[in-house]
Amino acid sequence: MLLSSILPAIAQDGKALFGKKCVMCHGVDGKKVAGVKFTEEGIKKGKPPKMPAYEGKLTPEEIKAVVDYANSLK
């Protein structure tokens, strides 16, 4: 498989995961919660009490895909 065909698939995964896990709080455009910087560490560890931790619930690749997608919205 070529890298050029893998990258869009990863981006789609990030978009799909964002839609399932993040959109209800962060909004479709990622701006519903102002001033949030999406990082892999932030997704892994969360920010209690509102932001759940996804370490162990999402793979490192899925976390990176979500971060990449969310940051592309800005």
Image: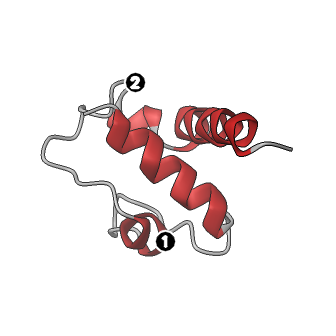
Identify the residue at horizontal 71%, vertical 45% (top origin).
Answer: 3
Label 2 residue SS = loop
Residue 18: assigned label = none
Q: Earlier in the sequence, mark 2 or mark 1?
A: 2
In this rendering, is residue 58 above or below 36? below
Which image quadrant for residue 5?
top right
Q: Nearer the viewer, residue 36 or 4?
A: 4
Q: Nearer the viewer, residue 13 or 45?
A: 13
Label 1 residue SS = helix
In this rendering, is residue 28 above or below 59? above
The type of residue carrying mark 2 is Val
Identify the residue at horizontal 56%, vertical 59% (top origin).
Answer: 63
**Which residue has dot 1 on it?**
44
Point out the residue furthest to the left here.
Answer: 35
Q: Residues within 10 Å of mark 1 (few under 14, many from 20)?
A: some
Which image quadrant for residue 24?
top left
**Which image quarter holds the C terminus?**
top left
Q: Nearer the viewer, residue 50 or 58?
A: 58
Indicate left or right for 66 with 56 as reference.
Answer: left
Residue 42: percent from the left, percent from the top?
36, 67
Q: Real-space Cα distance between discs 2 and 1?
A: 21 Å
The type of residue carrying mark 1 is Lys
In this rendering, is residue 16 above or below 52? above
**Which residue has dot 2 on it?**
28
Point out the residue furthest to the top here.
Answer: 28
Identify the residue at horizontal 56%, vertical 50% (top origin).
Answer: 65
